Image (spheres, rainbow, N blue to C red):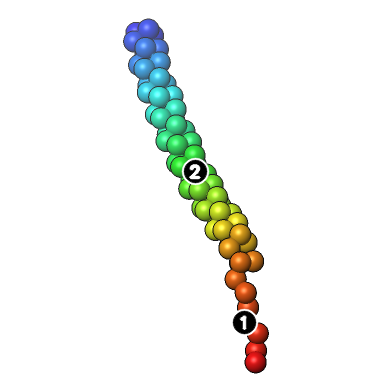
Amino acid sequence: MASAHQSRYYEQSQREERGLATQQHEESLRDMEQIRHAGSDAFRAQTEQAAIRIVTPHYKIPEKP
């Protein structure tokens, strides 16, 4: 009788551990995806700023007559 109870307890604990591991895995994937998007946004902003700095000196501001 005790072994049946122990095996049920073991199976339940294994299911809980797998569920927790799956949940943690999904959370870490979401975190990585957010970091990736934030990184690409920051890179895009840096690239745009660099392009503005490169192009701006080539324009001459017209002098007022």
Mark 1, Cα crowd under 10 Å, few <14 / some 14-19 / many 20+, is: few
Viewed as shown, does residue 62 lie left or right of 10? right
Q: Earlier in the sequence, mark 1 or mark 2?
A: 2
Tell me if residue 29 comes above or below residue 2 in the rendering: below
Quadrant for residue 46, please give it.
bottom right
The type of residue carrying mark 1 is Pro
What residue is rendered at 52% in x and 53% in y?
Answer: 44
Reading the image, the residue beneath label 1 is 62
* Residue 56 or residue 20, whichever sits in front: 56
- Identify the element where label 2 is drawn: helix
User: Is residue 29 rendered to the left or right of residue 65?
Assistant: left
| Quarter that holds the N terminus | top left
Residue type at mark 2: give it: Arg
Q: Residue at x 47, y 33 (%)?
A: 24
**Residue 31 image position (x, y, % from top left):** 49, 41
Q: Could you say where residue 10 lies in the image, as x and y percent from the top left?
A: 40, 15
Which image quadrant is residue 50 in?
Answer: bottom right
Report if residue 7 is visible in the image: yes
Position of residue 62 measured from the top left corner of the image (x, y, whole percent)? 62, 82
Q: Is residue 8 above or below residue 40?
A: above
* Residue at 65% over, 92% down: 65
Q: Estimate how packed mark 2 is, as few (under 14), some (14 to 19) or many (20 or more) residues with alpha carbons within 10 Å.
A: few
Q: Vertical placement of 13 versus 62: above or below?
A: above
For mark 2, what is the residue? 36
* Image position of 15 with respect to 31: above or below: above
Dot in front, 1 or 2: 1
Residue 34 screen position, x and y as percent:
48, 46
Image point (61%, 66%), residue name: 58
